[in-house]
């Protein structure tokens, strides 16, 4: 797609400082390495770098125009546009350039601390079973029939998001389900988009610290902000923060839950299922029995969220049943088939709340032992390490602590914090410390016994490991399968 600069900025608070107003624009980017002929490069001020300092590089790479927040010296042949808020304007101009693709699809945004990815995948599976062509955007990347792409953020930058939505529309998608993070909301990545439905899963402290949210109140406020952009909202009535999330929200509200009165409520006959190495759950809504191939009560909450949204979108009961029963979410309580008398799961749980929810769920299946392999990321809050160590010591029978994206921070520093958390949670819980994650996984598998559940957590869908400034291949599922096949 192409549009001249004059038409692109018409009606906005952008001001052309220099250059030809009829300059042709074919793409929008905020990374100078992606700039090329026809690109509008947007200068964003970030935590570690200011895009204004990379404008010259973008122009050298062929960018046709630059959008900045303050005047910067650039070659006379380059068009320069200025506005007070380049980040928000990037969302507006990207949507305009790509012909407002969000308006051409049914769009669902899912937010919450836990369960966003699973809920989004369950809803997408239902809609696919209902005969729709569906796109997915979130932690597991961007995907639609015949396509899959990794993403740098759960919610992509607005220029990338609008381009992906355009590609989905052009490939015939009539629906898109996307995770909307609080940081994505704060960064205006979905600015100007109207969602048909927003889904709230739950809320607990997360993403609070340097470079993230200042405190829990700010975190909650950005979660709530999504619903100002929704025609309808689907809310978990059992979450203690749902009242704050719904406060002042103008959209139509539909609720779900297991305990509190709700529009969609599962009956009291919830049952946990275990078939071979796959853990699941069954529940009843309005006299209809549903199953989900993921374990525990929290999976039922995710299924209820997806079911409620699917009903609002007119999906049939049979499609809902088939979608819930058949969905498998990469890296989310994902079973790894092994020819052994124990169960192996991989999961993305990488903070205290997610780990506690997962391990409590797995304990309900009464394993002979619950073994957990985990680490914590470098250059992240130390509180997360204490919390992860504490909850794993309290809820697991045996822990194997190891690396998990240590980045440039010394691994010993991270492991020392985890050890402190283990002592805080339950000093009697036995653990092994194996810094190399591959060897830690091998150790857990070698020592697993009949009836054990081995949960390898923290990386989930990720297929790489960041260590010492390098990004190394680390396909966890393949590593497990290869080792067990020996």
Image (cartoon, rainbow, N blue to C red):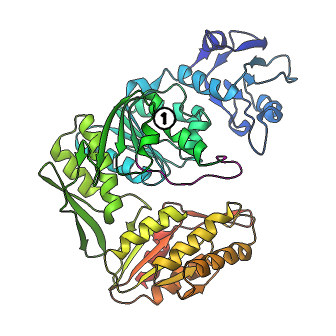
- Residue at x 56%, y 70% (from the top left corner): 388
- Residue at x 46%, y 28% (from the top left corner): 229
Q: Which residue is mark 1?
A: 226
**In which quadrant is the C terminus drawn?**
bottom left
- Residue at x 75%, y 64% (from the top left corner): 408
**Left or right: where 466 falls relative to 247:** right
Could you tell me if residue 37 is visible in this image? Answer: no
Q: Which residue sits furthest right?
A: 73
444 relative to 455, above or below: below
- Residue at x 45%, y 30% (from the top left corner): 248
- Find residue 417 and report its image quarter: bottom right
Total residue callouts = 1
x and y percent of residue 346 in the render? Answer: 44, 69
- Find residue 110 and report its image quarter: top left
x and y percent of residue 200 in the render? Answer: 41, 44
Q: Residues within 10 Å of mark 1 (few under 14, many from 20)?
A: many
> What's drawn in magenta, residue-wise?
201-214
């Amino acid at each position: 797609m192409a549009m001249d600069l004059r038409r692109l900025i018409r009606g906005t608070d952008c001001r052309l400082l220099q250059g030809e107003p009829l300059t042709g624009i074919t793409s929008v980017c905020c990374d100078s390495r992606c700039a090329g002929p026809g690109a509008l490069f947007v200068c964003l001020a970030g935590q570690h770098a200011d895009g204004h300092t990379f404008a010259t590089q973008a122009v050298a790479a062929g960018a046709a125009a630059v959008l900045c927040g303050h005047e910067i010296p650039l070659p006379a042949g380059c068009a320069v546009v200025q506005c007070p808020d380049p980040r928000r304007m990037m969302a507006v101009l990207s949507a305009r350039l790509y012909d407002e693709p969000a308006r051409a699809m049914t769009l669902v945004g899912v937010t919450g601390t836990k369960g966003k990815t699973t809920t989004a995948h369950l809803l997408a599976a239902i809609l696919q079973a209902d005969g729709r062509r569906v796109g997915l955007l979130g932690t597991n990347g961007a995907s639609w029939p015949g396509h899959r792409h990794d993403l740098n953020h759960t919610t992509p930058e607005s220029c990338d998001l609008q381009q992906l939505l355009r590609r989905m529309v052009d490939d015939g998608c009539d629906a898109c389900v996307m995770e909307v993070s609080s940081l994505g909301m704060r960064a205006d990545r979905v600015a100007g988009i109207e969602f048909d439905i927003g889904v709230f899963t739950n809320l607990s402290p997360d993403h609070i610290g340097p470079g993230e949210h200042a405190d829990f109140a700010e975190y909650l406020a950005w979660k709530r902000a999504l619903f100002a952009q929704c025609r309808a909202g689907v809310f978990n009535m059992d979450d203690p923060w749902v009242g704050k999330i719904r406060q002042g929200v103008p959209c139509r509200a539909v609720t779900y839950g297991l305990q509190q009165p709700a529009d969609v409520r599962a009956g009291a006959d919830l049952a946990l299922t275990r078939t071979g190495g796959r853990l699941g759950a069954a529940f009843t809504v309005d006299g209809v029995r549903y199953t989900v191939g993921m374990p525990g009560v929290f999976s039922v909450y995710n299924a209820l969220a997806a079911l409620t949204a699917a009903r609002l979108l007119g999906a049939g009961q049979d499609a809902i049943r088939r979608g819930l029963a058949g969905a498998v979410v990469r890296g989310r309580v994902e079973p790894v088939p092994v020819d052994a008398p124990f169960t192996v799961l991989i999961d993305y749980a990488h903070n205290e709340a997610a780990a506690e929810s997962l391990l409590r769920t797995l304990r309900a299946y009464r394993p002979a032992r619950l073994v957990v392999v985990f680490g914590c990321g470098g250059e992240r809050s130390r509180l997360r390490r204490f919390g992860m160590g504490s909850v794993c010591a309290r809820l697991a029978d045996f822990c194997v602590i190891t690396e998990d994206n240590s980045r440039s921070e010394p691994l010993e520093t991270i492991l020392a914090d985890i050890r402190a958390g283990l002592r805080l949670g339950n000093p009697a819980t036995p653990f092994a410390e194996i810094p190399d994650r591959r060897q830690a996984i091998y150790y857990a598998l070698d020592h697993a016994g009949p009836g054990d559940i081995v949960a390898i957590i923290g990386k989930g869908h990720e297929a790489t490991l960041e260590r010492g400034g390098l990004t190394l291949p680390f396909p966890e599922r393949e590593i497990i399968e290869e080792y067990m096949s020996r």
